[in-house]
Amino acid sequence: MKISYDKEADALYIRLLEGEFQCRVVRLTNDIALDFAAGEKLVGLEVLGASRLFEHPDAPDIELKDVLPRIASR
């Protein structure tokens, strides 16, 4: 997973799948779009006007929780 923020465009993009894909864009709102690849795989999502979501837009707090799969202990 890769999360990027373009300050100039005020756009946040969360990429869930790596690689090149031909995507179909589904707009949920004017500011939120989902990118789907073949087989309805969610490749990523874009949030425009993302700074409105952050308490401190210049240095937003980001929490990653349960992003990596848990490794079973032996």
Image (cartoon, rainbow, N blue to C red):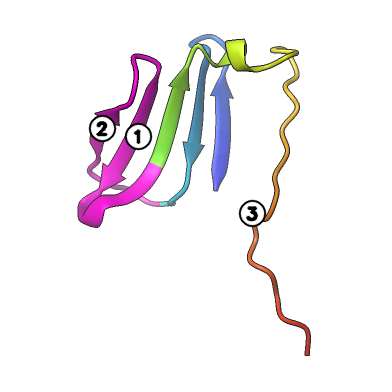
Mark 1–mark 3 distance (CA, rounded to whole Å): 19 Å
Residue range highlighted in magenta: 19-43
Q: Nearer the viewer, residue 52 or 43?
A: 52
Graded by Cα atoms within 10 Å as few (under 14), some (14 to 19) or many (20 or more), the crowding at tag 1 reads some
Which residue is labeled 1 in the image?
34
Q: Quadrant of the C terminus?
A: bottom right
For the point 67% across and 55% down, the residue is 66
Graded by Cα atoms within 10 Å as few (under 14), some (14 to 19) or many (20 or more), the crowding at tag 3 reads few
For the point 26% across and 31% down, the residue is 26
Check if mark 1's residue and mark 3's residue have beta carbons within 8 Å: no
Which residue is labeled 2 in the image?
25
Mark 2–mark 1 distance (CA, rounded to whole Å): 6 Å
Q: Choose top left, top right, bottom left or bottom right for residue 31.
A: top left
Q: Amino acid at mark 3?
A: Val
Image check: 3 left or right of 39?
Answer: right
Residue 44, compared with residue 67, is above or below; it is above
Give the residue furthest to the front: 28
Image check: 33 left or right of 56?
Answer: left
First in sequence: mark 2 vs mark 1: 2
Q: Position of residue 11 (x, y in %)?
A: 49, 18
First in sequence: mark 3 vs mark 2: 2
Check if mark 2's residue and mark 1's residue have beta carbons within 8 Å: yes
Q: Nearer the viewer, residue 8 or 51?
A: 51
Which residue is labeled 3 in the image?
67
Q: Position of residue 47 (x, y in %)?
A: 46, 22
Q: Is residue 50 magenta?
A: no
Q: Amino acid at mark 1?
A: Leu
Mark 3–mark 2 distance (CA, rounded to whole Å): 24 Å
